[in-house]
Image (cartoon, rainbow, N blue to C red):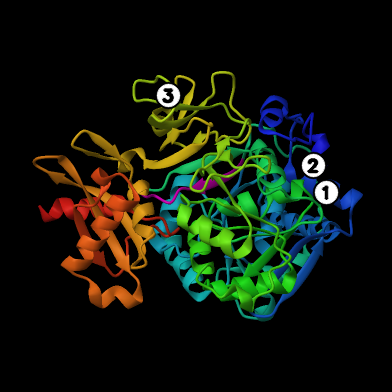
Amino acid sequence: MIERFLTQTRFTSEEDFKQNLHFKVPEDFNFAYDVMDEWARIKPDKVALLWTSERGEEVKATFKDLKEQTDQAAAYLQSLGIGHDDKVMLILKRHYQWWLSMLALCKLGAVAIPATHMLTAKDIVYRNQRASVKAIICCNDTYVTEQITEAMPESPTVKQLIAVNSMVEFSKPVPEGFHDWHNEWTKAPKFVRPEHVNTNEDTMLMYFTSGTSGEPKMVAHDFLYALGHLTTGVYWHNLSEDSIHLTVADTGWGKAVWGKLYGQWFAGATVFVFDHEKFTAEKIMRAMEKYHVTSFCAPPTIYRFMIQEDFSKYDLSSLKYCTTAGEALEPAVYEKFREITGIKMMEGFGQTETTMTLGTFPWTEPKPGSMGKPNPQYNIRLLKPDGTDCEEGEKGEICVDTRNGKPIGLFKGYYRDEELTRKAWHDGIYHTGDLAWRDEDGYYWFVGRADDVIKSSGYRIGPFEVESALMTHPAVVECAVTGVPDKVRGMVVKATVVLAKDWKDKAGDDLVKELQNHVKHETAPYKYPRVVEFVDELPKTISGKIRRVEIREKDRLKK
C-alpha cells in the first residue's frame, strides 16, 4: 500500500530517512477511497478494526466489512442532506460508529469535527456558531443529549441530530428531535459516490483546540492531512500488517486520528479499540493481554499508572513496541517502564495543527526525556526571538519553515480567523509556540510553552524541567510549575503540587523544604521552587491539559 504514496518505503538509518523520504501525492486524494477501499479490494478478509468494550462487546471488522459499512453510513448521511463541505460534529466517545462516521464523511467530502463528550451546552453553542455546524452525531448518553438539546435554540445552522446507541443498548429510545442511527441507517438507499468529492486543498477535518490559554481555536486540515500521518503509523509506531495497535485516546481529540485511524491503516495494521468509561491501568492491561496487543501508544500519564501495577499479574509477552506523545515524558517513567518490560519508549511530538514533527524512529536510539529528531516531512528550525537559528544548547521556539511550500500534514489555518493565523504563521514560518533546545547529537528537549517560560534573575526556566524533577519524588502525583512576581528577581518559581495519598498528612513546611532540596539535587539549583502550594487537584481543560494560565491568574488576584 505505502509504495503508492512514497518513492522509497524502507529506511535503515536516520540519514537514509532524511534524504529519501519523498511523497507521491495523488490528485484529489481521499483516504476513505484511496486507502481503505483499496485495502478492501486487495485484502478484503484482513481484520482492520478489532473493537471491544468493557461491557463485553466485540466486533472484528475486516477491510471489506468497513467498506460496506462506511458506504452504508455515507448513504444514510446523504439521505439526511449531508454533503460536500458540510460541517458535522461527532460526539461519540469510543463508540464503533465513530470510525464509520469519520470514513463516511470523508467519502462525502464533508468536514468532520470530532469533539469530547464532556462539552457543556455553552461549549456546544460556541462550536456550532463558530463552525456553522450542520449536523451532530452523538452517543445516546443522557448528559450529552441534554447538553445538545439545551444548545439548539442558539444553534440555527444545525439541521440534523443523530443519536447512536452502544451495541448492547441498541433498542434504547433516543430523545425527541434526534434521529435513531441504529433503526435508520440500514434503510438508506444504496450509496452512490458523488461525481466530485474533494480536492487536496478542501477541508476534511477540523479540531477545536483545548484552550489552555483562551477560547478554543478552530484548526482546519485539508485532505492531505491523512496522508501526512503515513509516517506516524508506518515509521514512528513501526507498524506492519501483522501489528495489533492500541492508542489510548478519546475520539474527541487529535490524538485519536494520530493513533486510531490514518497512519495505522496505511500500514495495514489491526486497530485495536477498548471502549471504556473510566481509565484504570488494570482494565487496559487486561485487554492488552486478552487480545495480544503488539504495539501500544499512550501519553506519559498512562505509563505512570501502569508502572504502579504488578506486571507479574499480566501476560504482556505479545507487546513489542511502545510509543508516547501528548505531553513531555519524564526520564524516570521511561527508565522504570524499560526496567519492567525491557521495551524502550519512543517519544514523539506534534500539535493539533500538525502531524508528528519530531520523533524517535526505529533506527534512532532514544534518549530518555527527549522528543527525538525532526521528521524529514517537515523543515524544522529552532529559532530565537529575533528569528535567527539557535546553536546547540540554546533554547528556542520549534518552528516549521514553509517558504518552499506547505508540508503535507500542516494545517490550512485557523478557520475564520485570519488574524490569528497570521500571528502564528507569517513570513514563511509557522510558529508552534513550544520551546525546546537541541543537543550535540541533534535530539530535541522540551522546555515548555512560550507563554509558560519563567524569567527569574536573568534565567529562563522551563516549567517541564522543574516538573520532571518534582515527579521523581514519591510524594508527588501531579504538579504544575508557574512563575509568580517577585520584587527582587522579577519572577520566582512556584510549584503547585498534588500529593500522593500516603503523603497528604505530611503537607507542611518540612515537606516543602524536602521538595525544594530534591529539585536542587535533580536539576540546576537555581530552578528550585521558592514557593510550593499543596492542592487537591490542578485546573485542567476538558482534554486533561493543565491550565497554568489559571494558576497564574489566581496568584495575580491574590496580590
The residue under label 3 is 391
**Rendered location of residue 11, percent (x, y):** 75, 35
**Residue at 54 percent of width and 23 percent of height:** 402
Identity of the amino acid at label 3?
A: Glu
Task: Say the numbered circle drawn on residue 419.
Answer: none
Q: Note whether residue 58 is visible.
A: yes
Identity of the amino acid at label 2?
A: Asp
**Residue at 54 percent of width and 68 percent of height:** 306
Question: Where, quadrant-wise, is the N terminus in this rendering?
Answer: top right
Task: Look at the numbered discs 2 and 1 and tell me whether their residues touch, using CB distance below 8 Å.
Answer: yes
The residue under label 1 is 37
Q: Note whether residue 249 is visible.
A: no
Of 198 and 56, which appears nearest the observer?
A: 56
Task: Say the numbered circle drawn on residue 34.
Answer: 2
| SS for callout 2 | helix
In the picture, measured across the screen, residue 168 lies left or right of residue 249, that is: right
| SS for callout 3 | loop
How far apart marks 1 and 3 lie (CA) works out to 47 Å
**Over which residues does the magenta segment extend?**
204-213
Mark closest to the chain's N terminus, 2 or 3: 2
Decide: is 116 above or below 17: below
Of 48 and 421, which appears nearest the observer?
A: 48
Instruction: Give residue 49's quadrant in the image.
Output: bottom right
How far apart marks 2 and 1 lie (CA) works out to 6 Å
